[in-house]
Image: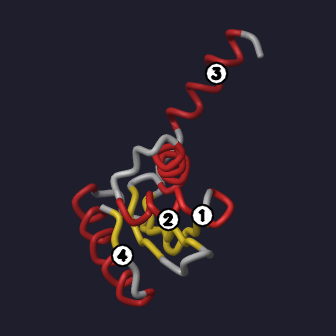
Amino acid sequence: MGAADRKAAVAEYKKRKAVAGIYAVRCAATGQVWVGRAPDIETIQTRLWFGLRTDGNQHPAMQKAWNAHGADSFSFEELELVDADDAYARDSALKDRMEHWRATLKADGIV
């Protein structure tokens, strides 16, 4: 990939619209489930997995399960997409829907 192609790819990435949503992280070995919200659902798994791999995740129970059972025991699932153009409405909807999914799945929250 040449410099011009790379520059065009970066420009396209920056123009994309982020899609907010609710997600779940599951540990098959323990049965634990964590539910979180993200303003950009497409990038959150990469961030979470990086933190877990580098022992830098801010959720002690999730980090402990990762360390004990490894990456193969973990899965990521998009639960719901939230469509709101206004930042306040989006944040409010994400908060409400996250609480719904936490209760439904009897899961811990990821903040």
Task: Give whichever of discs 4 and 3 has the lower sequence position.
Answer: 3
Closer to viewer: mark 1 or mark 4: 1
Q: Name the one closer to the observer, 46 or 29.
A: 29
The three-letter code of the residue at mark 3 reads Ala
The residue positioned farthest toward the top in the image shown? 3
Could you classify mark 3 by the number of other residues whose Cα lies within 10 Å: few (under 14), some (14-19), or many (20 or more)?
Answer: few
Residue at mark 2 to residue at mark 3: CA–CA distance: 40 Å
Residue at mark 1 to residue at mark 4: CA–CA distance: 18 Å
Percent of width and height locating residue 107: 40, 80
The residue singled out by tag 4 in the image is 108
CB within 8 Å, label 1 to label 4: no
The residue singled out by tag 3 in the image is 8
The residue singled out by tag 2 in the image is 65
Residue located 51% across and 68% down the image: 25
- Looking at the rendered structure, the secondary structure element under dot 4 is strand
Q: Quadrant of the C terminus?
A: bottom left
Which image quarter: residue 97? bottom left
Q: Which mark is residue 69?
A: 1
The three-letter code of the residue at mark 1 reads His
- Looking at the rendered structure, the secondary structure element under dot 2 is helix
- Rendered position, 1 above or below 71: above
Residue at mark 3 to residue at mark 1: CA–CA distance: 41 Å
